[in-house]
Image (cartoon, grey):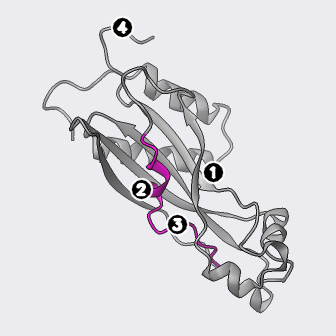
Amino acid sequence: GLDPDVIPLQDDFREGNIDPRTSPRGPSATMEEVFITRYKAAVLDRLPAEDYPDTILPPQVAMFALPEGLTVKMSCPLPTAYIVVFTSNEGRRMYGSVLTFHEELTEEQRRKMSNEDPPGGNSKLWIPKCLCLLSHWPFHEPFREFLKQLYRISLTASRIPVERIIANLLYEVPLPPRGRVK
Protein backbone atom coordinates (compact mmCIF):
# COMPACT_ATOMS: atom_id res chain seq x y z
CA GLY A 1 0.00 0.00 0.00
CA LEU A 2 0.80 3.64 0.03
CA ASP A 3 2.76 4.96 3.01
CA PRO A 4 0.95 8.10 4.27
CA ASP A 5 4.20 10.08 3.93
CA VAL A 6 4.77 8.97 0.33
CA ILE A 7 3.10 10.85 -2.49
CA PRO A 8 1.85 8.56 -5.26
CA LEU A 9 3.89 8.62 -8.46
CA GLN A 10 0.98 10.16 -10.29
CA ASP A 11 -2.13 11.78 -9.00
CA ASP A 12 -4.86 11.05 -11.46
CA PHE A 13 -5.89 8.93 -14.40
CA ARG A 14 -8.45 10.11 -16.92
CA GLU A 15 -10.13 8.77 -20.01
CA GLY A 16 -11.70 11.25 -22.41
CA ASN A 17 -13.83 10.72 -25.48
CA ILE A 18 -16.83 11.97 -27.40
CA ASP A 19 -20.28 11.46 -26.03
CA PRO A 20 -21.77 10.71 -29.45
CA ARG A 21 -25.37 11.50 -28.58
CA THR A 22 -26.04 13.31 -31.82
CA SER A 23 -24.49 15.46 -34.46
CA PRO A 24 -25.88 19.01 -34.82
CA ARG A 25 -28.95 17.71 -36.66
CA GLY A 26 -29.04 14.22 -35.18
CA PRO A 27 -29.65 11.24 -37.45
CA SER A 28 -30.84 13.55 -40.24
CA ALA A 29 -27.32 15.01 -40.61
CA THR A 30 -25.42 14.23 -43.80
CA MET A 31 -22.12 12.36 -43.59
CA GLU A 32 -20.43 15.55 -44.81
CA GLU A 33 -21.81 17.38 -41.77
CA VAL A 34 -20.60 14.58 -39.50
CA PHE A 35 -17.05 14.87 -40.91
CA ILE A 36 -16.82 18.67 -40.54
CA THR A 37 -18.37 18.86 -37.07
CA ARG A 38 -16.03 19.32 -34.10
CA TYR A 39 -17.67 17.51 -31.21
CA LYS A 40 -17.03 18.59 -27.64
CA ALA A 41 -14.69 16.37 -25.63
CA ALA A 42 -15.71 15.10 -22.19
CA VAL A 43 -14.09 13.11 -19.39
CA LEU A 44 -15.69 9.66 -19.44
CA ASP A 45 -13.91 8.04 -16.52
CA ARG A 46 -11.33 8.88 -13.92
CA LEU A 47 -9.36 7.32 -11.11
CA PRO A 48 -9.70 8.30 -8.34
CA ALA A 49 -13.41 8.97 -8.80
CA GLU A 50 -13.31 12.03 -6.50
CA ASP A 51 -10.89 14.93 -6.23
CA TYR A 52 -8.21 14.86 -3.55
CA PRO A 53 -8.85 17.49 -0.85
CA ASP A 54 -5.86 19.55 -2.01
CA THR A 55 -6.12 18.82 -5.76
CA ILE A 56 -9.14 19.53 -7.92
CA LEU A 57 -9.50 18.17 -11.44
CA PRO A 58 -8.91 21.10 -13.79
CA PRO A 59 -12.29 21.70 -15.47
CA GLN A 60 -10.60 22.24 -18.82
CA VAL A 61 -8.79 18.86 -18.87
CA ALA A 62 -10.89 17.50 -21.77
CA MET A 63 -10.24 20.63 -23.82
CA PHE A 64 -6.48 20.40 -23.19
CA ALA A 65 -6.41 16.67 -23.98
CA LEU A 66 -8.24 17.23 -27.28
CA PRO A 67 -7.65 20.92 -28.10
CA GLU A 68 -9.17 20.70 -31.57
CA GLY A 69 -12.25 18.85 -30.37
CA LEU A 70 -13.33 15.49 -31.71
CA THR A 71 -13.69 14.87 -35.39
CA VAL A 72 -14.84 11.70 -37.12
CA LYS A 73 -12.28 10.12 -39.47
CA MET A 74 -12.60 7.53 -42.23
CA SER A 75 -9.25 5.92 -41.41
CA CYS A 76 -7.49 5.18 -38.14
CA PRO A 77 -4.51 7.51 -37.50
CA LEU A 78 -1.55 6.31 -35.43
CA PRO A 79 -1.56 7.14 -31.70
CA THR A 80 0.14 10.39 -30.63
CA ALA A 81 1.56 11.48 -27.28
CA TYR A 82 2.11 14.95 -25.88
CA ILE A 83 2.21 16.87 -22.60
CA VAL A 84 0.12 19.72 -21.20
CA VAL A 85 0.69 21.91 -18.15
CA PHE A 86 -2.08 23.37 -16.01
CA THR A 87 -1.29 26.32 -13.75
CA SER A 88 -3.69 27.22 -10.95
CA ASN A 89 -4.47 30.75 -9.78
CA GLU A 90 -1.99 30.14 -6.94
CA GLY A 91 0.78 29.23 -9.40
CA ARG A 92 0.73 25.47 -8.66
CA ARG A 93 1.43 23.34 -11.71
CA MET A 94 -0.14 20.08 -12.74
CA TYR A 95 1.47 18.16 -15.58
CA GLY A 96 -0.56 16.07 -17.98
CA SER A 97 0.74 13.31 -20.20
CA VAL A 98 -1.73 12.51 -22.97
CA LEU A 99 -1.93 9.56 -25.36
CA THR A 100 -4.50 10.03 -28.14
CA PHE A 101 -5.63 7.04 -30.17
CA HIS A 102 -8.71 6.30 -32.27
CA GLU A 103 -11.52 3.81 -31.72
CA GLU A 104 -14.04 2.58 -34.22
CA LEU A 105 -17.53 3.99 -33.77
CA THR A 106 -20.17 1.36 -33.19
CA GLU A 107 -23.05 1.13 -35.64
CA GLU A 108 -25.36 2.52 -32.95
CA GLN A 109 -23.11 5.56 -32.35
CA ARG A 110 -22.81 6.16 -36.09
CA ARG A 111 -26.59 6.02 -36.57
CA LYS A 112 -27.09 8.61 -33.83
CA MET A 113 -24.93 10.95 -35.88
CA SER A 114 -26.32 10.21 -39.33
CA ASN A 115 -28.54 7.68 -41.05
CA GLU A 116 -26.39 7.95 -44.19
CA ASP A 117 -23.72 5.38 -44.94
CA PRO A 118 -20.11 6.57 -45.10
CA PRO A 119 -18.84 7.38 -48.60
CA GLY A 120 -16.96 4.83 -50.68
CA GLY A 121 -18.62 1.82 -49.07
CA ASN A 122 -16.35 2.23 -46.04
CA SER A 123 -18.36 1.14 -43.03
CA LYS A 124 -15.70 2.00 -40.42
CA LEU A 125 -15.53 5.43 -38.84
CA TRP A 126 -13.02 6.44 -36.17
CA ILE A 127 -13.14 8.92 -33.29
CA PRO A 128 -10.26 10.06 -31.02
CA LYS A 129 -10.00 8.91 -27.44
CA CYS A 130 -7.39 9.84 -24.83
CA LEU A 131 -5.62 8.39 -21.86
CA CYS A 132 -4.23 11.07 -19.53
CA LEU A 133 -2.03 11.02 -16.46
CA LEU A 134 -2.12 14.15 -14.32
CA SER A 135 0.54 14.78 -11.70
CA HIS A 136 2.28 17.48 -9.72
CA TRP A 137 5.52 15.78 -10.78
CA PRO A 138 6.98 16.46 -14.27
CA PHE A 139 7.83 12.83 -15.08
CA HIS A 140 6.93 13.21 -18.75
CA GLU A 141 8.91 10.32 -20.24
CA PRO A 142 7.94 7.67 -17.63
CA PHE A 143 4.29 8.72 -17.86
CA ARG A 144 4.33 8.59 -21.65
CA GLU A 145 5.87 5.12 -21.54
CA PHE A 146 3.26 3.99 -19.01
CA LEU A 147 0.43 5.25 -21.23
CA LYS A 148 1.91 3.55 -24.30
CA GLN A 149 2.20 0.25 -22.42
CA LEU A 150 -1.28 0.62 -20.96
CA TYR A 151 -2.70 1.18 -24.44
CA ARG A 152 -0.77 -1.82 -25.80
CA ILE A 153 -2.00 -4.02 -22.95
CA SER A 154 -5.58 -2.87 -23.51
CA LEU A 155 -5.41 -4.23 -27.08
CA THR A 156 -4.40 -7.73 -26.02
CA ALA A 157 -6.08 -10.44 -23.99
CA SER A 158 -4.81 -10.31 -20.43
CA ARG A 159 -5.79 -11.93 -17.17
CA ILE A 160 -4.86 -8.72 -15.35
CA PRO A 161 -7.52 -6.01 -15.65
CA VAL A 162 -6.32 -2.63 -16.89
CA GLU A 163 -7.76 -1.04 -13.73
CA ARG A 164 -5.36 -3.14 -11.62
CA ILE A 165 -2.39 -1.88 -13.64
CA ILE A 166 -3.51 1.72 -13.12
CA ALA A 167 -4.09 1.15 -9.39
CA ASN A 168 -0.59 -0.34 -9.14
CA LEU A 169 0.92 2.86 -10.53
CA LEU A 170 -1.28 5.10 -8.38
CA TYR A 171 -0.92 3.36 -5.05
CA GLU A 172 2.07 1.01 -5.07
CA VAL A 173 4.87 2.50 -7.18
CA PRO A 174 7.11 4.75 -5.05
CA LEU A 175 8.54 8.02 -6.28
CA PRO A 176 11.95 7.65 -7.91
CA PRO A 177 14.99 8.95 -6.01
CA ARG A 178 15.66 12.67 -6.58
CA GLY A 179 17.60 13.19 -9.82
CA ARG A 180 17.06 9.60 -11.05
CA VAL A 181 14.25 10.06 -13.55
CA LYS A 182 15.17 9.28 -17.16
Residue 2, horizontal then vertical, whole percent = 41, 12
Asked whether the beta carbons under mark 4 and mark 3 sit within 8 Å of each other, the answer is no
Judge left or right: residue 90 versus residue 157.
Answer: left
Residue 85, horizontal then vertical, whole percent = 29, 48
Judge left or right: residue 22 versus residue 27.
Answer: left
- For residue 4, which numbered disc appears in the image? 4
Residue type at the position of mark 4? Pro
Asked whether the beta carbons under mark 3 and mark 2 sit within 8 Å of each other, the answer is no
Residue type at the position of mark 1? Leu
The boundaries of the magenta stretch are 58-73
Number of the front mark, 4 or 1: 4
In the picture as drawn, the residue positioned furthest to the front comes out as 89
Judge left or right: residue 146 versus residue 27.
Answer: left
Residue count near mark 3 (Cα–Cα under 10 Å), binned few <14, some 14–19, many ≥20: some
Residue type at the position of mark 2? Phe
Whole-angstrom CA distance, mark 3 to mark 1, is 24 Å
Number of the front mark, 4 or 3: 3
Whole-angstrom CA distance, mark 3 to mark 2, is 9 Å
Mark 1 highlights which residue? 155
Residue 87: in magenta span: no
Mark 3 highlights which residue? 69
Number of the front mark, 4 or 2: 2
Residue 89, horizontal then vertical, whole percent = 26, 39
Nearest to the observer: residue 25 or residue 123: 25
Mark 2 highlights which residue? 64
Earlier along the polypeptide chain: callout 4 or callout 3?
4
Asked whether the beta carbons under mark 4 and mark 2 sit within 8 Å of each other, the answer is no
Whole-angstrom CA distance, mark 4 to mark 3, is 39 Å
Whole-angstrom CA distance, mark 4 to mark 1, is 34 Å
Residue type at the position of mark 3? Gly
